[in-house]
Image (tube, rainbow, N blue to C red):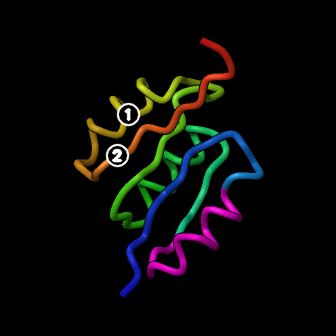
Amino acid sequence: MAKHILLIDDDEHLAAPLAAYLKRFDFELASALRPSAGLALLRTEAFDAAILDVMLPEMDGFELCRTIRKESDIPIVMLTARGEV
């Protein structure tokens, strides 16, 4: 049975290639562009892990992580990229 991972990242071009890559390793990827949509998915579906972008609209990834932790203990990977030092 495939592991189900949730990606919450506002980069709309990231989910499709990541989903294709992870599928090779028997992972299913669901994605949300906004924290509110990601939280709604977490409340209605079972996920094995979440990947959160640090820089998000509505709330940053750290605040989102704290919000998720109030309701779930799923593993969380924080994703960040800096354009400059």
Nearer the observer, 7 or 37:
7
Which residue occupies 54% across, 36% down?
53
Which residue occupies 27% across, 48% down?
72
For the stretch drawn in magenta, the main secondary structure is helix
**Which residue is farthest right?**
13
Picture disc at residue 76:
2
Within-10-Å neighbours for mark 2: few <14, some 14–19, many 20+: some
| Drawn side of residue 10 relative to residue 63, left or right | right
Please count the marks in the image.
2
Which residue occupies 45% across, 78% down?
25
Name the amino acid type tagged 2.
Ile
Residue contact at pointers 2 and 1, CB within 8 angstroms: yes
Is 29 rendered above or below residue 25? above
Task: Report the magenta residues as a range.
Answer: 15-28
Picture disc at residue 17:
none
Task: Where is residue 26? Give x, y as percent.
Answer: 45, 81
- Mark 1 — residue? 65
Is 43 rendered above or below residue 21? above
Within-10-Å neighbours for mark 1: few <14, some 14–19, many 20+: many
Q: Quadrant of residue 71?
A: top left
Task: Where is residue 82? Give x, y as percent.
Answer: 61, 23
Is 1 rendered above or below residue 50? below
Residue 3 in the magenta stretch? The answer is no
